[in-house]
C-alpha cells in the first residue's frame, strides 16, 4: 500500500472508532537515568579541590590553548561548576571564565580561525558546555551578558544579513570560512542559547532573531547558512525558533524545505515539540515539490503507526488546520 493511502486508511479507520487507547511511554536510556558517575563525584568536591582542578586546567597559567586540559574543563563545566555558589566564587575571584570566553570571541580569531578538523572538535564540545554552564544560574548569566562573545556573534551575523548595511570582505560566516574553519560552531552555540529562556532573551537583546529571519529569506541565496540555522537551533521553546523553522519549511528553496521537513520529522520524537512538528508537517503535504510532500507523508505515516492515540492527535491537528484555512479563505 502506498504511504499516502496508508496514512489516509489509518486515519479513516480511527475516525470510525469511539474509543482511544492510552499511549505507552518509553523508558529513559540507562545512561540518562544513572548519569555520569565521575561527574556526580566531581559535583561534590570541596572548594580547595575545585581550585586545584581549576589550576590543573592551565587556563590561569598560560594563554596557549593547546596546553589547556580541555577534557578536565568539560568535566568541571558538567560537574562542580554547575553549583551556583562554586561558579560565582570562581567567576568573581579568578579570570577562569573570562579567559575561556575570550578564546571563543569571534574577533579574537583564536577559536574562529581553527581548522574544522576532527581533532579540533574538542574545542566545540567544550564551548557548548561553557555556554550551558553559564546559563544555569544568575551569576553565570551575568558573566555571559557582560562579555563580548554574544554581541560579536551578532556582528558576524550582521555581516551576512543583506538588510543590515554591514559588510566585510573577510566575513567569518562566508561560505569559505564555514566550510574550512570552526566559525560554523557559533551556530552550535546559538543553539545552546535558543534552548534556554535566558539565552533567548540574550539573543533578542542583540537582534539575533531579526537577522536570522533576514538570512533565511529565499532571496538571500545562502542555503549553507539556512542549513546551519535549521540544524543547530533548538525548538523545545515556542517562539522565534519555531517561526524560523516554519518559514524555511514554507518559503525556502527546495533543498531547504526538504531539510526543514527532515528536522520536523525528527521533532516528532521530542515530547515538547511533537504537537508543533505534527501540525507543521501537515502543511508540508501541500508542498509543490514531490520530494518534500512524500517525505512529510513518510514521517506522518510512521507517526500514526506507532499508536492509535497518535492517529487521534493527527486528526485533531488536521481538523484545526482545515478549519483555519477555510475560515481565513
Image: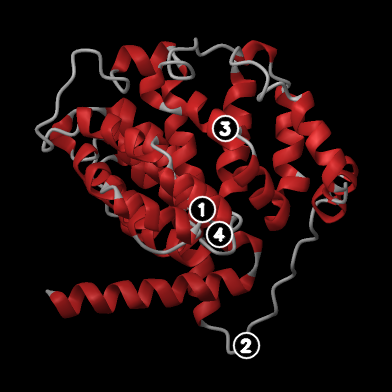
Q: Are marks 2 and 4 in contact (CB under 8 Å)?
A: no
User: Which numbered mark, 2 or 1, is in the foreground of this view?
Assistant: 1
Question: Alpha carbon of mark 4 to alpha carbon of mark 3: how far?
Answer: 19 Å
Q: Are marks 1 and 3 in contact (CB under 8 Å)?
A: no
Closer to the chain start, of discs 2 and 4, is: 2
Residue located beneath label 1 in the image: 141
Closer to the chain start, of discs 4 and 3, is: 3
Q: Residues within 10 Å of mark 2 (few under 14, many from 20)?
A: few
74 or 291, which lies in front? 74
Indicate the quadrant where residue 54 lies. Answer: top right
Asked if residue 151 is positioned above or below residue 315 in the image, the reply reads above
User: Which numbered mark, 1 or 3, is in the foreground of this view?
Assistant: 1
Question: Alpha carbon of mark 2 to alpha carbon of mark 4: how far?
Answer: 48 Å
Q: Secondary structure at mark 1?
A: helix
Name the residue located 70 percent from the left edge and 79 percent from the top edge.
22
Q: Secondary structure at mark 4?
A: helix
Marker disc for residue 127: 3
Q: Residues within 10 Å of mark 3 (few under 14, many from 20)?
A: many
Q: Are marks 4 and 1 in contact (CB under 8 Å)?
A: yes
Closer to the chain start, of discs 2 and 3, is: 2
Q: Position of residue 88 (x, y in %)?
A: 64, 52
Residue located beneath label 2 in the image: 19
Name the residue located 75 percent from the left edge and 26 percent from the top edge.
71
Q: Secondary structure at mark 3?
A: helix
Q: Secondary structure at mark 2?
A: loop
Question: Alpha carbon of mark 2 to alpha carbon of mark 3: how far?
Answer: 50 Å
Name the residue located 76 percent from the left edge and 62 percent from the top edge.
26
Residue located beneath label 4 in the image: 138
Inspect this view and state whether residue 74 appears. yes
Amino acid at each position: 500500500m502506498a504511504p499516502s493511502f496508508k496514512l489516509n486508511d489509518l486515519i479513516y479507520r480511527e475516525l470510525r472508532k469511539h474509543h482511544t487507547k492510552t499511549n505507552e511511554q518509553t523508558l529513559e536510556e540507562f545512561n540518562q537515568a544513572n548519569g555520569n558517575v565521575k561527574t556526580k563525584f566531581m559535583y561534590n568536591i570541596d572548594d580547595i579541590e575545585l581550585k586545584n582542578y581549576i589550576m590543573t586546567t592551565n587556563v590561569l597559567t598560560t594563554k596557549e590553548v593547546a596546553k589547556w586540559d580541555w577534557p578536565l574543563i568539560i568535566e568541571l563545566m558538567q560537574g562542580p561548576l554547575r553549583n551556583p555558589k562554586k561558579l560565582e566564587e570562581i567567576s568573581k575571584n579568578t579570570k577562569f571564565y573570562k579567559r575561556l570566553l575570550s578564546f571563543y570571541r569571534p574577533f579574537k580569531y583564536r577559536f574562529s580561525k581553527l581548522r574544522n578538523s576532527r581533532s579540533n572538535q574538542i574545542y566545540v564540545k567544550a564551548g557548548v558546555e561553557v555556554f550551558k554552564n553559564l546559563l544555569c544560574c544568575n551569576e553565570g548569566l551575568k558573566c555571559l551578558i557582560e562579555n563580548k562573545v554574544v554581541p560579536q556573534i551578532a556582528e558576524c551575523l550582521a555581516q551576512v544579513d543583506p538588510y543590515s548595511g554591514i559588510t566585510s570582505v573577510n566575513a567569518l560566516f562566508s561560505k569559505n570560512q564555514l566550510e574550512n574553519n570552526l566559525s560554523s560552531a557559533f551556530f552550535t552555540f546559538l543553539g545552546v542559547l535558543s534552548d534556554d529562556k535566558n539565552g533567548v532573551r540574550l539573543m533578542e537583546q542583540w537582534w539575533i532573531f531579526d537577522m536570522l529571519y533576514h538570512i533565511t529569506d529565499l532571496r538571500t541565496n545562502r542555503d549553507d547558512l539556512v542549513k546551519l540555522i535549521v540544524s543547530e537551533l533548538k525548538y523545545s521553546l515556542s517562539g522565534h525558533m519555531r517561526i524560523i523553522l516554519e518559514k524555511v519549511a514554507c518559503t525556502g528553496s527546495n533543498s531547504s524545505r526538504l531539510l526543514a521537513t527532515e528536522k520536523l520529522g525528527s521533532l516528532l520524537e521530542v515530547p515538547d515539540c511533537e504537537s508543533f512538528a505534527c501540525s507543521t508537517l501537515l502543511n508540508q503535504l501541500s508542498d509543490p515539490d514531490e520530494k518534500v510532500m512524500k517525505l512529510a507523508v513518510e514521517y506522518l505515516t510512521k507517526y500514526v503507526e506507532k499508536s492509535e492515540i497518535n492517529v487521534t492527535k493527527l486528526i485533531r491537528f488536521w481538523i484545526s488546520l482545515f478549519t483555519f484555512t477555510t475560515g481565513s479563505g
